Amino acid sequence: MEFVSIKRDAAFYDPFNEFKKTARTTDIRIDPLTGKTSRIIYFPVTLPPPPDPTPLAEMTQPFCPFCKPGVYEKTPRFPEEIVPEGRIERGDSILFPNAFPYDAHSAVAVVGDDHYTAMDAFRPETLINAFSAAVDYISRVAEYDETAVHHSISMNYMPTAGGSIIHPHIQVIAGDIPTTYQREFTQAARKYREDEGASFFDELIRQETKAGERFIKANDGVTWLSSFAPKGIAEFLAVFESPEPLTSLDSRFLDAFSRGVTNILAYLGSRNFASFNLALYSALAEDSPYPTHARVVPRTTLPPLGASDINYLELLHDEVLTIVTPEDAAAGAKGFFS
C-alpha cells in the first residue's frame, strides 16, 4: 500500500509581499485504494464563530415535523407487512418512512428530542438510539425483501450540509442498487483483496497505526483515522473490526461508534464548524471485501462572502479541494478522545 503525495509549486509575484517572487505549494494526494485524487491548498483562513442559531431554531420549531408530539401527526407510518406498529421507537428516537424516498426502502429517524443540538452537545445515548432504530429497520427490510442488500445510514446536519430540517435526524436507505460510492468502493476493495491477499482496511489500519500521523483512536472494535486523501474539507474514517453487516453486529460496535462520533463533533465544534455530513456503510451480507465503516465530513461556508465549500473541482471534476491537512485534523481530534 502506497500513500502517494505529489507536491507542485506555483510561482508568481506576490502583491501582498511587495511583489516578491513567491512559490506556493499544492499537495495532490492519491487515495491508496481508489486512485482518486484530493488537493490540499494553502489558504490562510480561520473560520469565524458560526452565527447564533437561536433565531433560526425558534422560527422553525413551531412547524417542525420531528418535534413531539407533532411527530406522531406529521410523519408517515410503515405498511404493516414491514413494520406492524407503524413506526420504530428506541428511547428518544422515532423512525418512520421517508416521505420523499431515495429508494424502495427509505426511512428517517429523529435524533433526540431537542429541536436544535450544538456540535458539542450530541450525546452518545441519543445517537445509539437513532442508529439502533435504523439497524432494526434494515433488519426488517432484509427479511421482507431479500434483494435489498445495499444498506446505508446517513446524516445531513444543518442547512450548510444539505439539511432541510433543523431537528437532527438520520436517513436510511436499503435497496438492490448500490450508490456510486458503494459500487466503486466494493469493486476496488475486492480487487485489492484479490491482488494483495489481504483486506484493504486491515492493511490501512496496520500502516496508519504504525505511522501515527493520521491515526486517532481504536476502542471497542472501532478504529478512527483521518483520511489520507479526504473527501471533504476534512474527513474522518471509522472502521469496524468485524466483517459482519450492520444487521449482524454486536451492539457494542454501535455504542463505540456513537461515542466516537460525539468526540469528532466536539472537536469540529471547537474549530467553529457548525454542520457535517455522515455516512455509515454496511458490509455486504456475503463475500464482503470490506467491513462496515463510516465517514464524517465537516461542512462550512468560507468567509468573507459565505462561499460554499464545494466548487467546480468537486462537482464537475470529482476531485476534492481542502484547506485542512489530514495530519492536522488527526492531531486536533485526538485530544477529544479519552
Image (cartoon, helix red, strand yellow):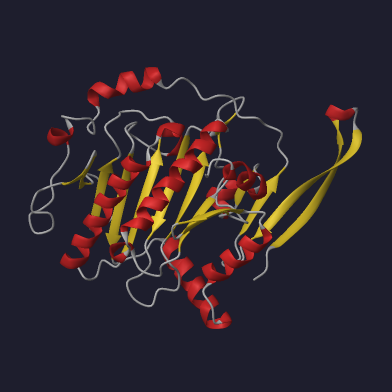
Looking at the rendering, in which quadrant would you find the N terminus? bottom right
Residue under the point 42% across and 64% down? 182
> Where 307 falls versus 184 (above or below)?
above
Judge whether residue 151 can be spotted in this image.
yes
> Where 46 falls versus 3 (above or below)?
above
Residue under the point 91% across and 27% down? 18
Residue 152 or 218: which is nearer the viewer?
218
Residue under the point 71% across and 33% down? 44
300 on left or right of 133: right
What percent of the width, then of the height, locates residue 57?
Answer: 35, 22
Residue under the point 60% across and 61% down? 36
Residue at the front extreme of this rendering: 338
Instruction: Place residue 334 in its image quadrant.
Output: top right
Residue 154 or 257: which is nearer the viewer?
257
What percent of the width, then of the height, locates residue 51?
Answer: 49, 21
197 on left or right of 148: right
What percent of the width, then of the height, locates residue 161?
Answer: 44, 38
330 on left or right of 56: right
> Where 321 falls versus 66 (above or below)?
below
Q: How many marks?
A: 0
Judge whether residue 101 can be spotted in this image.
no
What percent of the width, then of the height, locates residue 66?
Answer: 24, 34
